[in-house]
Amino acid sequence: MTSGHNAVGIGLAILSAFFYNGGLLAEKYALGRLPDIHARKAGAMVKTLASSPLWLLGFVTLLAGLGLQVLALSVAPISLVQPVFASGLVLFVVLSHLIFDDHMGTAEWVGVGTVLVALVALGLSVDPKADKAGAHAPFSTILIAAIPTAIAGLGLFYVADHATTWWRRGTKWNSPLYGMASGLMYGIAALGTKGLSTIVQSHGVVASIPRILVSPNLYLLAAAGAVGLVLFQTAFQRCSAPVLVPVSNVVSSAYLIAVGSVIFGERLPSAPGALTLRMIGFAGVVIGLGALAFAKDTDIPEVTGGLAGIEQATADALGEPRSPGTLSGKLAGPSEMAGRSENVPKQVATEG
């Protein structure tokens, strides 16, 4: 019977990933056409987002994905559901690359690929005969894990938001740091999701509804999800989606697997082969995140030397030889400069 439950859990996780990442794509498309938003102005952000029917459609689709995730976690273990759910980021990354023309450098592809291989390893480490969905856990235990995680997530968001001010090349850290911040908040929400799934597991879908409405896990899910939403949408409008989304998704999934498995009594595999695959999976997540974190450092050339430096950096980025005056000529040709010189005050021309 356990094997049958795991099969149902995998099917629900696939549907959950499809709806969740489809909702993200709709939100990303809508955000590109909305005014700037920021977590510091949450009220204005909510009004701006609510004014977009497309964003609301994406949000509802995303919620449907989370609902399916609750059902998946009620019949299959975390370490089986989450890798399948997180693998949906492949759909998002590929479609985002095609639809939004989001640039993916070599390091980013390597990072995303490493993460996906890690998720596959995590999935293969599950023993369908032994792994079972975790049982009820005290809410106080969940809070012990959630509170320091929330502090860490908000701290990472603050660092990401000020990275360009503190460091000359802080831009390279924005996407991964924002992703880690929102991922930790979504990880807390996932603990609430798992807590709700244990109610469904014990009482069935219909009978669990009144119990879910009074469960503190529902309000933990709502609070952490709301904060994660504000952080994520702020970053979503400012960062490269193919970096932000995988980092956020993987951090939340890895957090739920690592922390949730302990809280809800889901043990690591005892067989050496399965345990090795589980450890390889977690190591791959860390390595993949590191590749994503440093990807932008190799993609953004350092520009020095004024206009000449910009010309050289542009040529280097395009992989083309620099031709003198290429950029400056486009900015102002000889005839344009001659016309402008008539309006330049004599003293300025003399100083030049």
Image: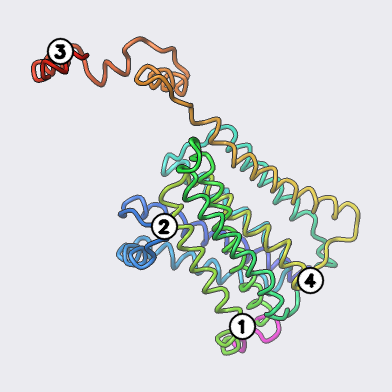
Q: Secondary structure at mark 3?
A: helix
Give the camera-side residue of 276 and 67: 276
The three-letter code of the residue at mark 4 reads Lys
Q: 24 left or right of 129? A: left
Residue identified by numbered label 3: 335
Residue identified by numbered label 1: 205
Q: Position of residue 313 (x, y in %)?
A: 44, 22
- Marks 1 and 2, how far apart at CA: 29 Å
Looking at the image, is 313 positioned above or below residue 201? above
Q: Position of residue 326 (x, y in %)?
A: 32, 15
Label at residue 27: 2
Crowd band around label 2 with a 10 angstrom C-alpha radius: few (<14), some (14–19), many (20+)? many
Crowd band around label 3 with a 10 angstrom C-alpha radius: few (<14), some (14–19), many (20+)? few
- Marks 4 and 2, how far apart at CA: 35 Å
Magenta residues span 200-208
Give the camera-side residue of 154 and 58: 154
Q: Position of residue 284 (x, y in %)?
A: 72, 45
Reading the chain from its start, which is encountered first: label 4 or label 1? 4
- Marks 2 and 3, how far apart at CA: 46 Å
Q: Position of residue 84 (x, y in %)?
A: 66, 57
Q: Residue at the spot x=31%, y=52% of the render?
A: 33
Reading the chain from its start, which is encountered first: label 1 or label 2? 2
Reading the chain from its start, which is encountered first: label 4 or label 2? 2
Dot in front, 2 or 3: 3
Residue identified by numbered label 4: 132
Dot in front, 3 or 1: 3
User: What residue occupies the far top of the structure in this picture?
Assistant: 324
Reading the chain from its start, which is encountered first: label 2 or label 3? 2
Q: Secondary structure at mark 4?
A: loop
